Image (cartoon, rainbow, N blue to C red):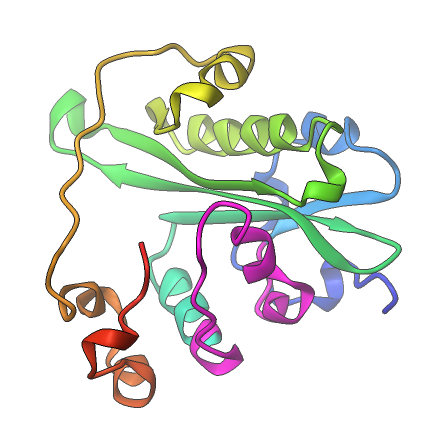
């Protein structure tokens, strides 16, 4: 598959929101850009599976989710790094903007789902993703950018300029229907399982 330029793609947000200095630091055979509406075909979910078990809902449902993110303007900023030779995704990450009533109606950037293809690890792609997402967060006016990580990844994020602060708490739903509440009605009508045995693994 030949490389697809940004001009040929339906991108989730404008490319110029990704800091230029990050783009310049990537190897010539790689390209960083916003998530595109056709990235299901470029292995988006396969890269996310580096992090955890990923349930593949199919391309149509993936596209519905893409449009749901786009409908929340200036909130979700998923980015990808693409290998130009294959036009396949090799790294991903997202920052979403939380608008608050405190701090003078301030905003906080939340970084999520950083993943790099195993064949591309060691090339500082994770660092470039973090730098790009932090830049998007700061340029969106966020007074801080935060993320969660395992203890083993703390040294990496410290190298990215983050500091360990406070603790994460989590409550996982035990109800098989709870996870569906964030999905669009269109997706649920066609794809959501009704049997507990088919609920997603967390």
Residue 173, placed above or below residue 114: below
In this view, the residue farthest toward the front is: 197
- Residue sitting at 35 percent across and 29 percent down? 148
Decide whether residue 40 is among the magenta residues.
Answer: yes
- Residue sitting at 59 percent across and 59 percent down? 46
Which residues make up the magenta segment?
Answer: 35-62
Task: Indicate the quadrant containing the C terminus: top left, top right, bottom left or bottom right.
Answer: bottom left
Residue 107, placed above or below residue 165: below
In-front residue for pair 175/148: 175
Task: Indicate the quadrant containing the N terminus: top left, top right, bottom left or bottom right.
Answer: bottom right
Q: Give percent across and percent down for residue 153.
A: 48, 22
- Residue sitting at 40 percent across and 50 percent down? 76
Q: Give percent across and percent down for residue 22.
A: 68, 28
In the rendered structure, the answer to whether residue 196 lies left or right of residue 121 reads left
In-front residue for pair 73/77: 77
Decide whether residue 42 is among the magenta residues.
Answer: yes
């Amino acid at each position: 598959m030949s490389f697809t330029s940004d001009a040929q793609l339906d991108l989730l947000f404008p490319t110029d929101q990704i800091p230029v200095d990050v783009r310049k630091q990537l190897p010539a055979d790689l390209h960083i850009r916003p998530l595109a509406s056709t990235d299901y075909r470029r292995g988006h979910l396969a890269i996310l599976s580096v992090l955890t078990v990923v349930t593949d809902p199919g391309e149509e449902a993936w596209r519905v989710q893409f449009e749901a993110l786009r409908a929340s303007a200036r909130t979700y900023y998923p980015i990808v790094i693409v290998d130009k030779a294959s036009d396949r995704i090799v790294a991903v990450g997202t920052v979403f903007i939380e608008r608050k009533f405190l701090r003078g109606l301030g905003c906080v950037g939340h970084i999520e789902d950083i993943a790099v293809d195993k064949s591309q690890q060691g090339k500082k792609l994770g660092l470039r993703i973090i730098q790009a997402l932090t830049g998007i967060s700061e340029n969106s006016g966020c007074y801080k950018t935060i993320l969660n990580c395992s203890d083993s990844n703390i040294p990496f994020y410290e190298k990215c300029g983050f500091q360990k602060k406070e603790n994460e708490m989590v409550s996982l739903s035990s109800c098989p229907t709870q996870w569906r509440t964030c999905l669009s009605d269109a997706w649920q009508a066609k794809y959501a399982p009704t049997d507990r045995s088919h609920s997603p693994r967390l």
